[in-house]
Image (tube, grey):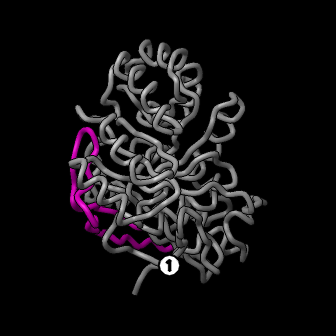
Amino acid sequence: MKLTLYPFELKFKHTFTISRKSKDVQPLLVVRLAQDGKHGLGETADNAYYNMTVPLLMADIEKHRSFIENYTLSTPEQYWADLYPLLGHNLFALCALDIAAWDLYAKLQQKKLYEVWGLDITHNPMTDYTIGIDTIPNMVQKLKEFPWPIYKIKLGTKEDIEIIKALRAHTDATFRVDANCAWGVEETLRNALELKKLGVEFIEQPMPANDKEGMKIIFEQSALPVIADESCILEADVAACKGLFHGINIKLTKCGGITPALRMIREAKSYGMKVMTGSMNESTVGTSAVAHLLPLLDYVDMDGPLLLASDTSTGITMQEGRIFYADRTGTGAELLA
C-alpha cells in the first residue's frame, strides 16, 4: 500500500467551548492508503486532553511507514490486528489507518461500506448539533441561526439550568446535555430533575471518569439516563460501564477506529445498553466513516463538519438532522482539490 499523510488546521465557525477548554482551530490528520488502483481515506484529530498533537500522530505513523507500505490489505480486521502491536500506544493514529483501510476495502469490493456489512439504512438515527458554552445570549443566538431537530448543549457552568431554560424558550427541539465531567453527585441528581422538566433526553458524562462510586448512585437515582463518554474510551471500558451508565458514546478516534468500535457496539448491546457515536470535531472524512455505522446506533453526534468554517473533503451531507450518503463506494469521502 502507498501511504500519504495530509495535516490540516481548520477554523471553527465560532469559538468552541466545553467545561474544561476553548479552541478556535481544530488540527486534523488525514491518511490516504492506496492499493490495486483504489485508495481509502481515514482521519484522526488533535486533542490536548489526550496529549495528542498532529506532529506526534504523524511521527508515530512515519515510524512504521515501511511496514504499512509493504502490507497487502486482505481484511481491515486483520490489518488492525497486525498494526496494534506497533501502534497500540497511539489509538488516535491507529484510528486513521483503520478508517482508511475500511474505505479502501469497500472500494476494492465496489460497495459502500454499509453494504459490506449488509446493513439497512432506512431507519438511521439523526445527528444532533452542538451548542458550545458561551454567554446565554450568544448560545441563544447560535441556536436561532442554526435551526435543527436535536441539539447537544455543552454545560458545566454556574448557569446550567438557566441556559437550558433560555434555549427551551426558542425551540421545541430535542435537547441532550453534556457536562464533560463538570458535576458532582448532588449537582447531577438535582440537575437531572430540572432538565427532565425541560425536555432533555439524556445527560452525557456528568461526572469525572474516576468517580465510579458516584456514578453508581447516579445510575440508580438519576431522573434521566446517563451516557458514558470519558468513562468509555477503550474496548475494556464497555464492561466497566455496565451498572454505571445507561449507554456509551463511542468515539472512533479514541478507541482506535471502526474495527474496535464494531466490537464495542456488539458488547454494549449484549448488556442492554444504548449506543452512540460522538465527534472529536472531525471533518467530512472521519464523519463519513461514522455515517456507515448509523444502522447500529441509537444516537449519533456527528456534527463536526457543521461546526467548522472549512472542510477537508466532500462526502456525506446533513440536512435538518438527516444524513445523506455520497453516491460513491467506500465511505464516500474524497479530498477537496
Can residue 290 be spotted in the picture?
yes
Residue drawn at 68 percent across, 63 percent down: 74
Residue 268, position as x, y percentages in the image: 64, 34
Work out whether residue 147 or residue 204 is closer to the camera in this orientation and state it: 147
Work out whether residue 46 or residue 23 is closer to the camera in this orientation and state it: 23
Left or right position of 53 against 110: left
Q: State which quadrant residue 288 falls in.
A: bottom right
Residue 107, position as x, y percentages in the image: 65, 74
Residue drawn at 50 percent across, 15 percent down: 216
Can residue 94 be spotted in the picture?
no
Residue drawn at 46 percent across, 69 percent down: 284
Q: Assess whether residue 272 is covered by the magenta stretch.
A: no
**Magenta segment range?**
1-30
Compared with 327, 22 (above or below) is above
Work out whether residue 9 or residue 150 is closer to the camera in this orientation and state it: 150
- What kind of residue is marked 1? Glu
Residue 169, position as x, y percentages in the image: 39, 48
